[in-house]
Image (cartoon, rainbow, N blue to C red):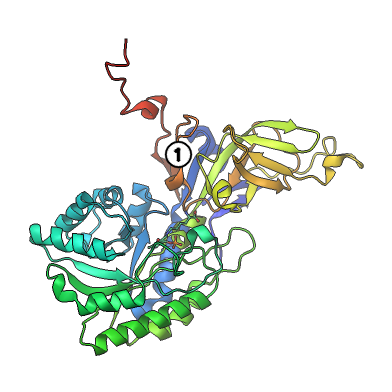
Amino acid sequence: MNMHDFVYRNGEMVCEKVSLTRVAQEAGTPCYVYSFKTLVEHLQKLQRALRELDPLICFSMKSNSNLTLCKALVDCGAGLDIVSGGELYRALKIGTDPQKIVFAGVGKSDEEIKEALHRRILFFNVESIPELERINQIAAQERRRPNIALRVNPNVESSTHHYIKTGVGTSKFGLDFETAVKLFKEKRKYPSVRLVGIHVHIGSQITESRPFVQALRKTVDLIEELKRHGHWIGWLNIGGGLGIIYQRETPLTPRQFADAVVPILKGKGLRIILEPGRFISGNAGILLTRVQYIKETPAKQFVIVDASMGDLIRPSLYGAYHKIVPVIKRATDPSTALRAGDRRRTTAVDVVGPICESGDFLGKDRELPGLQQGDLLAVMSAGAYGFTMASNYNSRPRPAEVMVKGNRFAVIRQRETYADLIRGENIPPFIAR
Ligand code: LLP
């Protein structure tokens, strides 16, 4: 099974059938490059593995909200998991059926709630009592009665970065079980909503089955308890979180995930929703970047590239590892090979960006011998939480995005221009002279 469709052909990395050198020539660097095939196959692998449950798979747009990419998934039957009015706007722009949209997040504003109510989305995933009160109140005004899934916090540990753990008791996400039970008991207080679902998401980049199993067992027990008390619950949203391979992880395959969770979920009379992001988009994208300079210092060799933490912040923010490989595999040239006794012989290089921060790096201590100015590098597994977390720090335009399908490719988002950088800014008269 191929993990992705970025492979070497005759010493050059291609995406499906397209040369990355050509993409760089036409779209410029840095740019994100996505493989349609990898993307869609990841969705289909999950769909197949979980067929028994016939779930609604809502792709988590926060991992990648590019219109073309989301449209490709929606066309293959996916729904969308959104967390903002902006993501709702994008979802509707590509014609997503609102009955396949679920809306999560702890801070939904009045405007976001109203918009989602008007569009008749499938579910609001509710994270607190005041949020439930607010949705109930706005729904009454707007004469709507939306479906609500209470997001519960099962208080299970998972071995992932603490910034992206969400299922522990101290996290801002979800409701503890007692509060959830209390809200169901008091549901008459909320007559303008339908309290018919439970949502649970315990974190991201989870590579073992244990936390999923623990969380789902606890949650299914809670649902059974609620049902015994006469509450009708038709839906269980089990969130996202499936990990992928960045370096040497051994994440669950869709089959292993299914083997772990299906027995807990099947035959319970529940419609299942899933919200995977990274699993679908992560390995479907790379960040293509060009070497600007090779800088030697007494201590280190730096490969300065044209991509930065502004384009891909995961290494700087989480200490995340992304494999970095040359687009053209070059046999090490003996004339440039390091001499015996050369200190750098054992010193691998740091791949860094142009931003004025020491934290601006894409990889540290990497074995990348023989690089030269102008070489292209591929930063792997950058399809999830790559572009969506990009910023304009140091007034750098955000990169282009390219979609490859077979032997075709297209720029699906233009590189930003300097004019884009200042769009919306104005100098007020009391400053202007
Ligand atoms: N559902 C909910 C409620 C979530 O909060 C998330 C991710 C997902 C689904 C999708 O999770 P996934 O399947 O992608 O693991 N920026 C971080 C990841 C933050 C995840 C936030 N929530 C990173 O770059 O690793």
Residue at the spot of label 1: 391
Residue 333 appears left or right of 262: right
Comparing 347 with 230, the one in front is 230
Describe the element under mark 1 as helix, strand or loop.
Answer: loop
Residue 208 to residue 402: above or below: below
| Residue 54 shows in the view | no
Identified at 48% across, 81% down, the residue is 260
Image location (x, y in percent) of residue 209: 52, 76
Q: Is residue 228 shown above or below 45?
A: below
- Which picture quadrant has residue 49? bottom left
Rendered residue at 40%/68% (across/down): 201
Residue 335 appears left or right of 4 = right
Q: Quadrant of the C terminus?
A: top left
Residue 102, percent from left and from top:
28, 62
Is the N terminus in the top left, top right, bottom left or bottom right quadrant?
bottom right
- Residue type, mark 1 in image: Ser
Q: Farthest right residue?
A: 341
Query: Which quarter is ligand 1 in?
Result: bottom left
* Location of residue 132 with respect to 385 vertically, above or below: below
Q: Quadrant of residue 202?
A: bottom left
Please state the horizontal and vertical placement of residue 48, each as a whole percent of the image.
41, 73
Q: Is residue 353 left or right of residue 192?
A: right
Q: Is mark 1 within 8 Å of ligand 1?
A: no
**Outermost bottom residue:** 228
